[in-house]
C-alpha cells in the first residue's frame, strides 16, 4: 500500500520498542501509519537499545501478570511472522530476605493466577543453585518457568520490519517539536524541527525519557517522569565455570530484592560474561547526558563477591558496560492514557516505563493501538496507568535514584 502525501490515519512519535510495536499493530490493522524518530533508527540514546532485557512474569503487582502473559504470546507471534528469534527462554528466580514484602507479593500473584512456581527456603535454594549462587542464611527464592532474555535492538528492528511489511512509513532524523489540533479539518498536525509537517487523524506519543518535555510543550501538562542514566555491567565468569552460566542450562534470569535491587541474566550475548546490574540510576537531563560513570560499583562488587564468589570475577570490575536511560515515574507504574484537554482521545501517551517495560512492548503496542483506533483497550485495566494519578503531586517523588556515584 503506497501512502501519498503527508496524511496518515495514525502518526506515532518515537521509535523505541513502544512506538515500533504500536506502528506494527496499527499498520497490521490496515491503517496508514507513520512512525517518526528524532535520531537515527536503533540509536543508543534512549531506553530500547542493547543486547539483553529480562523477561519475567513475576511481579508483586498483580496487574502486570496478564500483560506479561499476553506479551509472551505476542512475542511468539511476531517471531513466527518475521522468521527469527528475539526471545530466549530461561527459568526465572526471585530472591531476597524471607520477610521481603515484594517476594511475598510475588508468591501471592503466583497463587492467584495458578502460575506453577517453587518457593525455595535457603537450604533448597542452595541445593538447587549449588555452584552458581552462594545463598545467605535468611534468603528465600521463588522459581518459575517464565523467565528469559529478549534481545532489544534486534526486537525493535523486527517491529520496524514488520511495520514496513504492513505498509507503514518510517522516518528518522525528525524531531517532533509540536503537536497541534486542526480546529477546522479535525485531526492532528505534527511539526518537526527540520520544517516538515504531517497530518494524522490520530497520534500516539511514545518518546521514553523525553515524555515530560514533549507533553509539557504540547499541552502544558506536567508529568513526573524523570530520566535516569543507568549502567548495564558485564562480569567475567572465572575459567572453568562458564558452562554453568550459559543460557539454556540451569542458570536463571534473576532479581534480588534488596537495597539496591540487583538483577542479572545468563550468559548469552557475550560468551564468558554474565550481566549483573543495579536497578536504578542517576537523574539526568535527557539532552545533556553525563555519559557515565553512573555505576553503583561498590554495591555491585560486594554483591558479586558475596553471592557469586569463586565463579565470577568481581575484583577486576565489569569488563564491559553500556549506558541507557530509564523514564521513571514515582510509583514505577507506566503512563498509558489519552492526553485529554483540547486533544481529547485523539492523542494517546505511552511513557514512564520505569526500567521494566521492554518485556511488555508487544502488549503495550496492542493497547496503544486499541486506544488510538477504538477509544478503549480490550481486556486490560488501565486505572494504574492513568495520568490523573499524579494530580495531587505533579512533580512526584521518583525513587530508585542511586545516592552516590561510586
Ligand atoms: C539498562 C536498562 C535495562 C533494562 N532492563 C529491562 C529488563 O530487564 N526488562 C524489561 O522489561 N525492561 C527493561 N528496561 C526497560 C525498557 O528497556 C524500557 O522500559 C523500554 O525500552 C522503554 O521504551 P520506550 O519506547 O518507551 O522508550 P525509548 O526506547 O527511549 O524510545 C523513545 C524514542 O522516542 C524518541 N523521541 C523522543 N523525543 C522525540 C521527539 N520529540 N520526536 C521524535 N522522536 C522522539 C527517542 O529518540 C527514542 O528513540 C531496561 C531499561 C534500561 C535502560
Image (cartoon, rainbow, N blue to C red):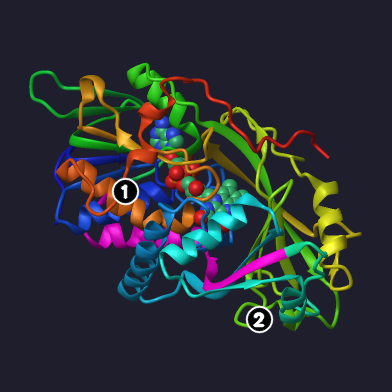
Q: Is residue 63 left or right of residue 355?
A: left
Determine the residue located farthest toward the right in the rendered image.
315
Read off the magenta span: 140-169
Residue 175 drawn at (x, y percent) = 40, 32
Residue 243 drawn at (x, y percent) = 73, 83
Beta carbon of the mark 2 residue lies under 8 A of ligand 1: no
The quarter of the rendered structure image containing the C terminus is: top right
Along the viewing direction, whichever of 111 and 181 lies nearer the viewer: 111
Residue 33, label in figure = none
Q: Residue at x 91, y 59 (%)?
A: 315
Q: Residues within 10 Å of mark 2 (few under 14, many from 20)?
A: some
The quarter of the rendered structure image containing the N terminus is: bottom left
Along the viewing direction, whichever of 243 and 143 lies nearer the viewer: 143
- SS category of the residue bearing label 1: strand
Residue 250, label in figure = 2
Q: Classify 186 as above or below 255.
A: above
Marks 2 and 1 in Cβ contact (< 8 Å): no
- SS category of the residue bearing label 2: loop
Residue 170, label in figure = 1
Q: Residue at x 76, y 70 (%)?
A: 122
Q: Is residue 153 left or right of residue 284?
A: left
Q: Residue at x 29, y 46 (%)?
A: 368
Q: Quadrant of residue 245?
A: bottom right
Disc number lying in front (2 or 1):
2
Amino acid at each position: 500500500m503506497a501512502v501519498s502525501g503527508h496524511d496518515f490515519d495514525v502518526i506515532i512519535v518515537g521509535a523505541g520498542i513502544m512506538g515500533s510495536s504500536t506502528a506494527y499493530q496499527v499498520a497490521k490493522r490496515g491503517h496508514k501509519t507513520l512512525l517518526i524518530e528524532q535520531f537515527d533508527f536503533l540509536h543508543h540514546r534512549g531506553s530500547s537499545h542493547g543486547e539483553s532485557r529480562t523477561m519475567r512474569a513475576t511481579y508483586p503487582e498483580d496487574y502486570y501478570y496478564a500483560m506479561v502473559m499476553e506479551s509472551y504470546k505476542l512475542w511468539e507471534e511476531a517471531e513466527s511472522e518475521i522468521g527469527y528469534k528475539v526471545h530466549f527462554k530461561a527459568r526465572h528466580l526471585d530472591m531476597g530476605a524471607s520477610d521481603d514484602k515484594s517476594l511475598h507479593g510475588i508468591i501471592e500473584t503466583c497463587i492467584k493466577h495458578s502460575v506453577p512456581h517453587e518457593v525455595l527456603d535457603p537450604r533448597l535454594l542452595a541445593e538447587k543453585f549449588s555452584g552458581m549462587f552462594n545463598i545467605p542464611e535468611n534468603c528465600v527464592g521463588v522459581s518459575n518457568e517464565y523467565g528469559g532474555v529478549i534481545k532489544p535492538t534486534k526486537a525493535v528492528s523486527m517491529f520496524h520490519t514488520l511495520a514496513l511489511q504492513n505498509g507503514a512509513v518510517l522516518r528518522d532524523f525528525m524531531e517532533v517539536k509540536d503537536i497541534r489540533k486542526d480546529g477546522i479539518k479535525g485531526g492532528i498536525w505534527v511539526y518537526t524541527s527540520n520544517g516538515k509537517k504531517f497530518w494524522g487523524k490520530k497520534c500516539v506519543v511514545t518518546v521514553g525519557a523525553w515524555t515530560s518535555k514533549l507533553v509539557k510543550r504540547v499541552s502544558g501538562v506536567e508529568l513526573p517522569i524523570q530520566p535516569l542514566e543507568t549502567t548495564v555491567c558485564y562480569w567475567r565468569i572465572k575459567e572453568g565455570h562458564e558452562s554453568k552460566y550459559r543460557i539454556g542450562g540451569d542458570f536463571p534470569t534473576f532479581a534480588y530484592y534488596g537495597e539496591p535491587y540487583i538483577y542479572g541474566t545468563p550468559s548469552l550475548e557475550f560468551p564468558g560474561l554474565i550481566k549483573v546490574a543495579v536497578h536504578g540510576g542517576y537523574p539526568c537531563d535527557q539532552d545533556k547526558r553525563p555519559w557515565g560513570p553512573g555505576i553503583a560499583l561498590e554495591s555491585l562488587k560486594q554483591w558479586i563477591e558475596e553471592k557469586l564468589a569463586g565463579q565470577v570475577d568481581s575484583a577486576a570490575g565489569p569488563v564491559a558496560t553500556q549506558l541507557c536511560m530509564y523514564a521513571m515515574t514515582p510509583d514505577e507504574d507506566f503512563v498509558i492514557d489519552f492526553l485529554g484537554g483540547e486533544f481529547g482521545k485523539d492523542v494517546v501517551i505511552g511513557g514512564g516505563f520505569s526500567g521494566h517495560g521492554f518485556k511488555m512492548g508487544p502488549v503495550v503496542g496492542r493497547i496503544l493501538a486499541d486506544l488510538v483506533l477504538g477509544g478503549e483497550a480490550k481486556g486490560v485495566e488501565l486505572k494504574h496507568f492513568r495520568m490523573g494519578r499524579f494530580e495531587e503531586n505533579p512533580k512526584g517523588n521518583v525513587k530508585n535514584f542511586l545516592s552516590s556515584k561510586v
